[in-house]
Image: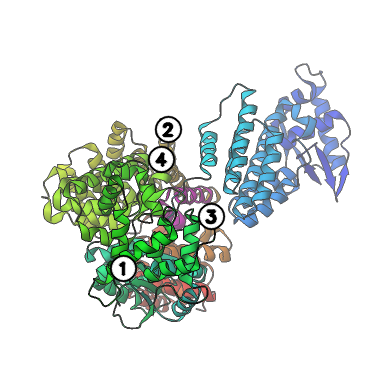
Amino acid sequence: MEVGVLGPLELREDGRTVAVLGAQQRALLAVLVARRGRVVPAEVLIEALWGEDPPRTATHTLHTHASRLRRTQGIPLRAVDGGYLLELEADRVDGARFEALVADAAVSPASDAARLLEEALALWRGAAFGRAADLVAVRGEALRLDEARSAAREQLAAALHAAGRSAEAVAVLEELVADEPYRETAWTQLVRVLTAAGRPADGVAAVARASASLDELGLRPSADLRAAQQEALRGGPARATARPSLPVPASTLVGREADVAAVDDLVGTQPLTTLLGPGGVGKTRAALEVARRRAGRHRAGVRLVELATLTDGAAVPAATVAALELSGEGGTTSTMLRRAGTLDLLVVLDNCEHVIEAVAAVVEDLLAAGGPLRVLATSRERLEVAGERVYAVAPLAVDGDDPSARRLFVERARAAGAWSAEPDPAELDRVVRELDGLPLALEMAAARAATVGLADLADQLEVDAARLEHPGRGTAARHRTLASVIAWSSALLDDAERSVLADWPVFAGPVRPADATAVLEAGADVPDRLVRRSLLALDVRDGRTRYRMLHTVRSAVLDAAPVRPALRRRHADWFLRVATEADAALRTSAEPEACALLSVQVADLRAAHAWARGADPALAARLSGALHVHATGTMNDEILGWAARLGPVLDDHDPSGAAAQVSVAARLVVGGELQAGEHRARRALEVAPDDRVRITALEVLGDVALYDGRLEDSAALGLRIVELARSLDDPHYVMTGLSYPLLCASYAGRHDEAQEWLARTREELGRFDDLGPTVLGNLAYAAGEIEIEHRPAVALAHLERAAALAEQSGCTFLGGIARVSASSVRARHQDPAAAMAAFDEVVRWWLVRANRTHLVTTLRNLVDLLERVGADTAAAELWGAVVLGGGSVSFGAERARLDQARERLEIRLGAQRFADLADVGATLDPETAARRALAAMAVGPAEP
């Protein structure tokens, strides 16, 4: 016998509906099912059947109805003292089956989740319990189920969208808001799905419909719905990503088809390919096209290292480490680069010539392992590294029936608005020949063609022919074909344009219009005019307007005059302000945009810090302080490393350098040097000029105590952080501070205390109106951590939410630790195959980032899984690597699981065999141990 409550109450047997005779028997059954598994007092049942005025025979009649349900319907109902108990298995009630399917969907990949949710929702036939929902004793359960149904429809839409089935997701949400026009969460989700599906206008229209519905109740749209509206108006949400995208080309690639194909073939077979040619010949454009074509063929993807912004060869290794998304926990930069060489990754090193020796050393490290990594470099001279294959990028062809130089010039000139009639082919050929087919020069001339007749343009170039020198005539290599073009273009500018062009090299990378206005004190339209003349370029990688100066143009402008010191000062002051404002925004819902801004503007932050280290060390220290939260959250070792360079110019006891001291301390700690990091943090705490610096120093000290297993010390330091954070009204550090006593209580096995701390944390955060995704993600992470040993499914849901919020905010660190804990849950409670897939992903995630500390933590949890699936040899070896190999302390439940795994392995393998394997593991570094574990998972369980 089965009971259906997802619609009018019904009984089913062998697929057919069985009638329940009598309204009172149906009411009795409804109340019992609503409270299945619990004793229902007789008084409650009597009130449900007769209301407030039952007959004197009510108790006897109730007993009669219950007996009939047992005897005629086969309902497993038992009379107990004072009431009745329905003993019906969960799988015999459609409501329970529905909730089980929804719970399974919550921990499944998107495509599987969509299938499970569709199956769950198909169980519904109408409102829960039908008319029986009017009974007071049933109403609460009916409302709960109806709400669960609506939530499942939202979950289904999210799963369909994540699985790439956006049109179906929209249909689900449209049906939901039609059924429940006041359900604001559904409206918000609909707006975001429409926007993400490329339909922002429909998203805006959906907001209007939602507002009209809410207005009927006198309600205003919530902050979340208003945020979704802003995303739709922008055309999509501002997103931070841990992996920088390749710049989006602003125009088509002309005349390079054969070059791109040839270079593509070389990169596929050679470890190092260098595109060689003069400035402005199109090396970067060709390299990016090759990278785009190959992105899907490399498991770890493509990374672009833009070297044009660097002025010091010493910065090349750190900049490469940062671009490859490695962290400082892997050791020296050379060590990290060598480890990266084992990845299936394409690294594009762009504009190498001015730091050629440093680039050569970096390439040697990347290729030392002989792994699948490939390097594609662009340069004006060879790297002179063993195994280098050089591909010479020549100017475009100027001869023939339809030369590529002419095609490029015509296409760009028409795009600039030149010529209403067909141009004279002879005059076209004059122009492209005078410019030697050089793409940059052709684009500059094409921009001019919109305001100058073609014949006049060719005449001007002929007049300037002496200045357009060819290679070999003694001009510096980067100017043999560009110097006169740039000088000629500059001569055509007005005073405002010429001034901005001369000052623009103060910027090291792409900048926003606001940056140009503030630093150069230029009119808002001047950069646009320089873009039209091809002296500046638009950077459109994230859809926001930014300007950048081509490296070859920058070189020529700097040759004419260096950047003025006063301009360097204005640049540093401005970018300190940018970093400070972004740091404040990291505490709010604007965190993703702030994180993305700091990532995009890292070249100018780097340049500002480098200049300030020599001219104003105190300003450099303040800049390090403003970037501290961003650098630690994104695990950006390069930014933390800038503070270390202040050591020679700042006294350890100088309060103005305390913020930089904290960044140095944090870098030491993540690199495993706990004592040195603690010493630095204590010194910074002693001289800190304000509470904001003190709070960051206390955070480092709290981490060291936690890693050392000094849980009480760590919890006490966290409470000091909370006290300061309250005075600063800083939700980020309120969450950070409270996480220490919360997690320390959990790791010490005091679950009830940890739950109390979690409740207090939620209460504290409730004081803030606007919280960023990292704060919410840390809260979800903490909620998951304390439930891992008690309610694994609940823990996994919290941890997956933490990882999703980390992805949204760009907080790499939070995303990493959430993945580790989620994998640990899967290892012990899910299907082994799914758990191994999860571990494979997270182990590779830490390997790519060369993050040794959290790699070891992940491997400790992997021991459990290998032992569980019978891969005893691999498990014993890995046990030795993570327990006997040194590193941070293992304690609490994690250590208990490792000890239990050892005991089981010693029984199966024998104590001596286990000891021998563990000793082998103890000789392995974490990266080697990880790769051996990955190999063991790939081939399946190992024989003991």
> Which label number is shown at residue 763?
2
Q: Mark 4 points at which residue?
A: 753
Label 3 to label 1: alpha-carbon separation = 28 Å
Label total for image: 4
Image depth: mark 1 or mark 4 in front: 1
How packed is label 1: few (under 14 Cα within 10 Å), some, or many (20 or more)?
some
The x, y position of residue 67, in whole percent, is: 83, 35
> Which label number is shown at residue 465?
1
Q: What residue type is labelled 2?
A: Glu
Q: Name the residue under label 3.
A: 420
Q: Quadrant of residue 519?
A: top left
Q: Is mark 3 on a helix, strand or loop?
A: loop
- Who comes first in sequence, dot 4 or dot 3? 3
The x, y position of residue 166, in whole percent, is: 64, 50
- Who comes first in sequence, dot 1 or dot 4? 1
- Who comes first in sequence, dot 2 or dot 4? 4
Taking depth in this image into account, of 247 and 622 the one nearest to the observer is 247
Name the residue at the top extreme.
53
